[in-house]
Image (cartoon, grey):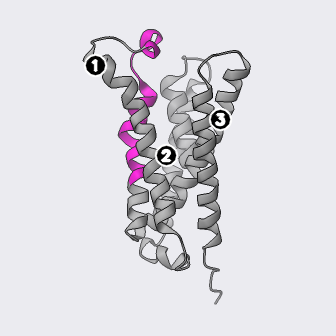
């Protein structure tokens, strides 16, 4: 749900207006409410009991925090020089603002960072949000890797760093997911 919410937020606010606009809006809205209703269905206070004591909270939480800091620094490295130099980023020449960077810096990255921090601190919301954030992160890294490879095959220069970064973060996300799922407690049947 988190991945679909982010994806259709981007389609709604970034894609050139087209005949699918209302479809994007409907999918964004449905994803938002489904995500919220899904989160509300959990008994947050019992979340830690759904995992073994061997869950590597520092690794999984640390990955989430590190990956968001690195992506945040990449976005800030694009934004801050244009603010200091009073120039307009190249990406804005055909739009109104840096929408992806704004969503990431305001919502996505702080949310994932907080998920990792809460998991490291063994807080109930950390146990609920960190697996969601890790799955979402893995899916986004796979999508960005696919985009980077496609751009590279189309002859667009400068895509190698993107391919390397998304491959590395995607691989670490998969390892983190494996460790999280490996440490899920079997449900007690009554």
Q: CA distance from mark 3 to mark 2?
A: 25 Å
Quickly name the residue at label 2.
32
Question: How many discs mark residues in the rendered view?
Answer: 3
The answer to the question of whether label 3 and label 2 lie on touching residues, with beta carbons closer than 8 A, is no
Q: Residue at x 44, y 13 (%)?
A: 90
Q: Main secondary structure of the magenta part?
A: helix
The answer to the question of whether label 2 and label 1 lie on touching residues, with beta carbons closer than 8 A, is no
Mark 3 or mark 2, which has the lower sequence index? 2
Residue 125 in view (yes/no): no
Q: Which residues are magenta?
A: 90-113
Quickly name the residue at label 1.
83
Residue 146: horizontal and vertical position, in percent?
68, 33
Quickly name the residue at label 3.
145
Label 3 residue SS: helix
Mark 1 or mark 3, which has the lower sequence index? 1
Q: Residue at x 52, y 69 (%)?
A: 56
Q: Is residue 126 above or below residue 33?
A: below
Quadrant placement of the C terminus:
bottom right
């Amino acid at each position: 749900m988190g991945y679909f919410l982010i994806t259709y937020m981007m389609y709604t606010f970034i894609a050139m207006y087209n005949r699918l606009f209302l479809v994007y809006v409907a999918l964004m809205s449905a994803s938002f409410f489904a995500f919220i209703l899904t989160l509300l269905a959990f008994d947050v206070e019992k979340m830690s009991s759904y995992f073994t004591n061997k869950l590597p909270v520092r690794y999984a939480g640390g990955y989430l925090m590190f990956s968001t800091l690195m992506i945040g620094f990449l976005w800030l490295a694009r934004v801050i020089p244009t603010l200091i130099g009073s120039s307009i980023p190249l990406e804005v020449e055909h739009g109104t603002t840096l929408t992806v960077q704004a969503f990431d810096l305001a919502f996505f990255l702080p949310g994932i960072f907080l998920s990792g921090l809460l998991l490291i601190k063994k807080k109930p919301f950390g146990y609920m949000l960190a697996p969601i954030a890790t799955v979402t992160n893995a899916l986004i890294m796979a999508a960005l890797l696919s985009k980077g490879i496609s751009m590279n095959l189309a002859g667009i220069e400068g895509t190698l760093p993107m391919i390397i970064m998304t491959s590395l973060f995607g691989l670490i996300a998969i390892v983190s997911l494996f460790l999280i799922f490996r440490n899920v407690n079997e449900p007690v049947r009554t």
